[in-house]
Image (cartoon, grey):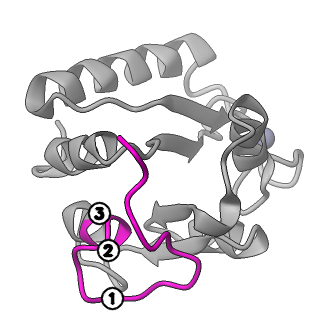
Amino acid sequence: MLIPGAAPAIRRINDSGLRAIVVTNQRGIALGRMTTRDLERIHVRLGALLEADGGASIDAFFYCPHNSGTCTCRKPNTGMVLEAQRRWPDIDLARSVIVGDSRSDVGLGEALGMSTILLPSDAPDLAAAVDIIIGKADVHLQGMPSSRAPG
Ligand SMILES: [Zn+2]
């Protein structure tokens, strides 16, 4: 069920002292295809799979349950990232990276001055994206931290 390599990649984020935060559009809730309870169960299950597969963990999931054009949180709107920043005021968006597979992910990051990694064009997969994020790859991203956060 997990993409191979995803859990070890997230584990490397955890071990580097960075936060791993999920922001996800879930319009299916507005459309009645699932409930918030269903989605929260999926997130719990996903967390258990990540833990079992790689000892990895997600610090928080933020989701937008709304339909297009009805809120300020559906990506590429910025609401979910700003909510994460309210929870952790030390988040420095200029030193944060959004990894995604759609233009809405990149648009959100650009709107907030974050670095962006679009899969698969900027990096082939999550493991490669993590290489960039933690500075092991020979790629420079504007705004990236120059050294690892204390872990
Ligand atoms: Zn929303």
Residue at the (58%, 77%) spot, across then down: 143
Q: Determine whether label 1 and label 2 are within 8 Å by CB.
A: yes
- Name the residue tied to disc 1: 139
Residue 111: horizontal and vertical position, in percent?
77, 72
Label annotation for residue 130:
3
Residue 67: horizontal and vertical position, in percent?
77, 44
Magenta stretch bounds: 131-151
Residue 67 in view:
no
Q: Determine whether label 2 and label 3 are within 8 Å by CB.
A: yes
Q: Amino acid at mark 1?
A: Val
The reply to whether the magenta stretch includes residue 147 is: yes
Residue at the (63%, 35%) spot, across then down: 63
Task: Give the main secondary structure of the magenta stretch.
Answer: loop
Residue at the (43%, 52%) spot, across then down: 149
Q: Amino acid at mark 3?
A: Val
Count neighbours of disc 1 (C-alpha within 10 A) and say few if under 14, some if 14 to 19, many if 20 or more. few
What separation in Å lies between label 1 and label 2 (alpha carbons)?
A: 6 Å
Q: Quadrant of the N terminus?
A: top left
Q: Nearer the viewer, residue 12 or 42?
A: 12
Label annotation for residue 132:
2
Residue at the (10%, 50%) spot, across then down: 4
What separation in Å lies between label 2 and label 3 (alpha carbons)?
A: 5 Å
Q: Nearer the viewer, residue 122 or 13?
A: 13
Residue 126 is drawn in which quadrant?
bottom left
Mark 3 or mark 1, which has the lower sequence index? Answer: 3
Residue 12: horizontal and vertical position, in percent?
23, 48
Ligand 1: does it lie within 8 Å of the C-beta at label 1? no
The reply to whether the magenta stretch includes residue 48 is: no
